Amino acid sequence: METPALWKSHKEGFQQSLEYMQGRMEGRIKSIKTPWDKFNDATTDGIEWHSLTVIGGRPGAGKTLVKDQIIREASTLNPGETFRVLEFQFEMLARTTAIREYSSILGRTYKYLCSADGVLSKEDLRKCLAHAKKRKDEPIDVVETPITVNELKEQIQMYMNAHATRDEDGRVQYTNTIVTLDHSLLLKKSSFEKEKFDTLYNLGEALTELKRKYPIAFIVLSQLNRNVDSPERSEDGKYGNYILESDIFGGDALLQHADTLIGLNRPGKQKIRLYGPDKYIIEDDKTLVMHFLKCRNGDTRMSFFKAQFERMQITEMPTPPQAVKRVGTI
């Protein structure tokens, strides 16, 4: 069989770019707005379709909370937009995620909703039932069974085809879909993958192939390398307090494929009170820091948030004051 030519005229790229720009100008093409203006401003007014967002952080830093809030509020924050959600959720049961959502809506703790901190009242159970009825028809699907990269790719292709339509000319129209993976380390190794790094390299390649073909916005959660927990990195006022690209587990495997890479940190949990060389004053362990380490179509920066873990809610907060300003800073 003759090898097909892979090149195409640069003219096509210009044409596609102009169509995309005009579509955004006219409001026909939009990013998915997240619940936080700081996040939207760092990116292209939210998460673009055909993109990969990787969020890395320690256990308990709030990665799943960030992902869950984006999904939970997506339909409200993006009225008039048609999209589906497919979640690969290997760490938590769908039941657990739903209870966490009730916690956010009612402002009650997870323990209370499970009658482990006082008995759940019939009135609060009724409110949970009403919320479940409201949400049950939203186009959200969950995969809980751990699978390999190839199986994940196959499931996504099946999903996109199952929800595709055809236009008047018979051309396939795929539905915009948010695909989440919580989290990358829980993917099963294939027989030909010797180490987890092999799995992550294959994952990066698979997600890039899929995002180029389909209108998917991937959100992938990842752990950090163990060296981030070395004692010297928890010393007040050190550059090592910050999350770096090299801290993301399998960073090289995912970094080159990611459009947005975020390092999520919770300094107070590490007993850090003066954060980084700028010595931002950390008042409690509810302060979250999002390090936007790579924003292919946005701006790298560091932004602060407040996590209300008892309510499963994250809100924006002002940048904390600095204990001592560095020479040359404004």
Image: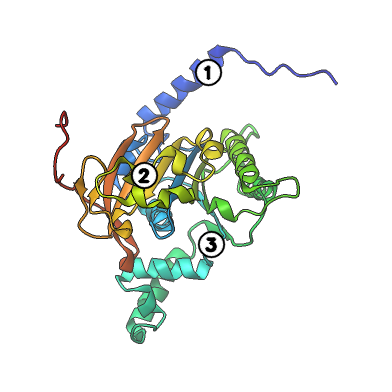
Q: From mark 1 to mark 2, how far is it between C-alphas?
A: 26 Å
The disc, 1 or 3, on the residue closer to the chain's N-terminal end is: 1
Circle 1 sits in a helix, a strand or a loop, which is it? helix
**Which disc is residue 91 wearing?**
3
Q: Position of residue 5 (x, y in %)?
A: 72, 16
The residue positioned 40% from the left and 40% from the top of the image is 244
Q: Quadrant of residue 113?
A: bottom left
Can residue 77 be seen here?
Answer: no
Circle 2 sits in a helix, a strand or a loop, which is it? loop
The disc, 3 or 2, on the residue closer to the chain's N-terminal end is: 2
Q: From mark 1 to mark 3, how far is it between C-alphas?
A: 40 Å
The residue positioned 16% from the left and 31% from the top of the image is 329
Q: 234 or 182, which is in the foreground?
A: 234
The disc, 1 or 2, on the residue closer to the chain's N-terminal end is: 1
Residue ID for mark 2: 33
Q: Amino acid at mark 1?
A: Gly
Is the residue marked by circle 2 packed among few (<14), some (14-19), or many (20+) residues within 10 Å?
Answer: many
Q: Is the Cβ of the residue at disc 3 closer than 8 Å to that at disc 2? A: no
Q: Is the Cβ of the residue at disc 1 closer than 8 Å to that at disc 3? A: no
Circle 3 sits in a helix, a strand or a loop, which is it? loop
Quadrant showing the C terminus: top left
**Which disc is residue 13 wearing?**
1
Above or below residue 10? Residue 197 is below
